Image (spheres, helix red, strand yellow):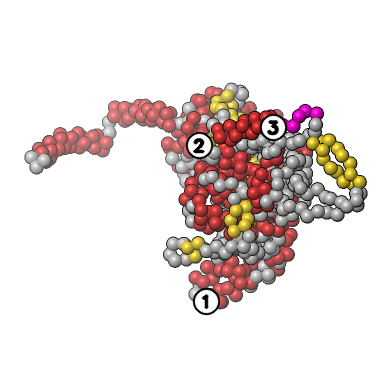
Amino acid sequence: MKRLIPSFLAALDKGLTFVNPLIAQAMWHLRHPTRRGVAWACAALPVLLLLYVLALIPFTPGIGDIRKAKIEQPARILSADGKLLAEFKPSNREWVKLKDISPNVVNALIATEDHRFYQHFGLDWRRTASAALHTFSGDRQGGSTITQQLARNLYPDEIGRAPTLTRKLKEAITAFKIEALYTKDEILETYLNTVPFLYNAYGIEMAARTYFDKSASELNVLEAATLAGMLKGNSYYNPVLNPERALQRRNTVLQQMVKYGKLTPAAYDMLKVRALRIDFERQTEPPGPAPHFAQQLRKWLAAWADRNDYNIYSDGLVVRTTIDSRLQSMATQAVTLQGNQLQGIANSAWRARAGCAGDKDLLQTFLRETPDYRAAKQTGLSDEDALKRVASDRDLVRSVCESKTRVQADFLAMDPRSGQIRAWVGSRDFSQDPFDHVQQARRQPGSTFKPFVYAAAFEAGAKPSDTFVDKPVEIPLAGGEVWRPSDEDEPSARAISLRDALAYSRNRITAQVMETVGPNKVARLARAMGVRDSELDPVPSLALGTSPVTLKEMVSAYGTIANLGGYVEPVMVTRIEDRNGEVLAEFAPAPAQQELPADTARTLIDVMRDVVSRGTGSSIRSRFGVRGDVAGKTGTTQGNADGWFILIHPQLVAGAWVGFNDSRVTLRSDYWGQGAHSALPIVGDFFQRAQRSRLVDSHVRFDTTQEPGWFAGRAARLREWFQQLFAAAPGKPEKVVVTRGPARRAPAAPVAPAEGGGGASAGSAASAAGSETVIEPRALPPLLPAPGSAATAAGGAVDGQAQGGGEPAIAPTPTPDDVVPPDVGSAADAGGANGGATR
């Protein structure tokens, strides 16, 4: 290397020695020009300019891009039943045909911006030369034609807006391309539909609505001149903020119309003295029937379009989604109705209009978190003085209080068989609450997490009839702490079955089950079943739902239960088509992944039926009249901060959450704060509407028939053989004694708790002294119910015998279709009963 450096320096010195005379000679010729040299220089300039223009062509929009802009169409989002959910526009714009735009607009535009529009081919050389001369003399003027302005509007990134020669050349090249592909009327139409007019109004139609509250087809001469005048400088000639300037500019436009024969002088004299008469109203894009769903879909579709070289704003994509517009409407109505009712309760509890007078300490905490308080502290004020200054602003206090105490709610429904999302409501009102609580908000799920604990227990071999003693529970934690879960009532010291523990949401029993199966196993199972994005802390209190999750995850996991243990990833789109209806991509449901054994899922569903038939969610039937085979779970977290309810059906899983954005705020009611009274009515109202509209079939049932194992099958065959061998002779049915008349009730044997209206136990017949007896024949029933028979439905007699010591019921237990149970036990879901957080 050391040898190479001297050689390199020597070569460089030799090269400079050769170049220096050439540079010196060129400089001499510049100082002493000849006629021939001047002629060559003048001839070279156009050539160099032409070469520069040719070099810039690849850096301007291509012919294909310009053709696409000519027929630009935003992506259209359709529901599964063909209803329009949204259009993905790059801006707030509504395209209108040139024939639907007032001729006054066209006349004002051409007279002011480009009066030789129909004579040139993209560049007005006379105007460009005039503008250049004025600019060189210090009076800068614009010389762009309408076509050049359109080029800037369509391709701001490729062309730019810097006042440089390169930008003007790019603009001119693009204008020539546009003129080659567009007719003059198409250029006018595209320009008028893409030009910005402030206040998120793009195009003449939105401008007409914003400033004059009318359509573009209805604009008169004065209104058209006002809008055309804004094009020179939207902000400077803003008729809302600068009416005097706008009026002067409008009259200048009218003068130009007179100059080029678009308006008579007499008409001008009459019009120039009139006022602006602005009727201003900001235009907002309608949110559509499923705005939060559309918001999430836009992100997904943008990524898909980038991977496949499509533009969601201009390629006319048609996206067919899984949303059912009818179910979506029902969900929105249910959320709005219940949210408004709970808001009235929150307003009374917090006295929101009085500035949260119900809790001054918490209000002071809220005020300390405002930018106004921080600004006051930065001026050197003490905490007390800064707080007094902020609290003296009544408008600020009221605003903070109302925002903090605004009730939030969300809802999600999906088909558990395919993972297709049917309804998605991210908040009570998208315009006020654009934050999507379904997918973005993570909250403690409370007792809605308990099914994962019991699923792990059933997978490990536990039975619904297994019992734990209701006793004080103390579980040591890392660091020497002790977790003591509690319920609303004191420990009873009696044995409670797993079936009853889940139906009535017993915390102490669930904690013992969690201790038995282990937090790590429960966390792994919950992740496998659908809680895949949120972090689950594998600690004992996880049993009561202390790790925050999203509603989408919970509904997805409950879908795994409803799908008999098969997890299906939630999907939003079924297929994507181009503007001509050609299918670009199809998205079939992903195959189910068996994350929970089917028999375990069947057992869990059977136990969760009791939640809605006699447990904490029983008002689903008693109040809302939901029919058919459904199961579910309520959830309430510590201090009633979060209310949950999720209902499963073979065709649909639906869940709702209710709370506040700030978990320090609650409804301050042990009744309304429960998930059974805050979130359940949303799901109940939705399901009730869906069943009445026959969008959910109430006759479809879960396939919860347990397949008998090898030993059970052999035992059943042996039992049948013995029954046939020792059966009574035909024609001699057993005689049953039925009593009539006055009777006294005989002591009955203990029977299992009623589960869906179970039948009477054997041996409970009354006996009466001296009563008339009637002998009636009856066929002898089998000694034991066959596996999977009706006797085991809805927590049937076999489980009942294990729990209560009674005999198997002979009559089949009525199903949920047959009996609507009374509303009992719903109060057990109060904060401590469901307790999503440790106490």
Q: Residue at x 62, y 27 (%)?
A: 186
Kindly indicate the quadrant of the structure image that contains residue 604: top right
Q: Secondary structure at mark 2?
A: helix
Q: Earlier in the sequence, mark 2 or mark 1?
A: 2
* Span of residues in magenta: 726-731
Quadrant occupied by the C terminus: bottom right
Task: Inspect this view and state whether residue 694 appears.
Answer: yes
Q: Residue at x 78, y 49 (%)?
A: 764
The circle on residue 382 is 1
Tell me: residue 119, above or below residue 375.
above
Q: Secondary structure at mark 3?
A: loop
Residue, disc 3: 726
Q: Position of residue 558 (x, y in %)?
A: 60, 43
Nearer the viewer's eye, disc 2 or disc 1?
2
Q: Amino acid at mark 2?
A: Ala
Badge 2, how many Cα within 10 Å: few under 14, some, many 20+?
A: some
Q: Position of residue 413 (x, y in %)?
A: 65, 41
Q: Position of residue 690 (x, y in %)?
A: 73, 39
Q: Secondary structure at mark 1?
A: loop
The magenta stretch spans residue 614: no
Q: Residue at x 80, y 31 (%)?
A: 732
Depth check, front residue: 192 or 645: 645
Badge 1, how many Cα within 10 Å: few under 14, some, many 20+?
A: few
Badge 3, how many Cα within 10 Å: few under 14, some, many 20+?
A: few
Q: Amino acid at mark 3?
A: Phe
Q: Position of residue 460 (x, y in %)?
A: 52, 45
Residue, disc 2: 303
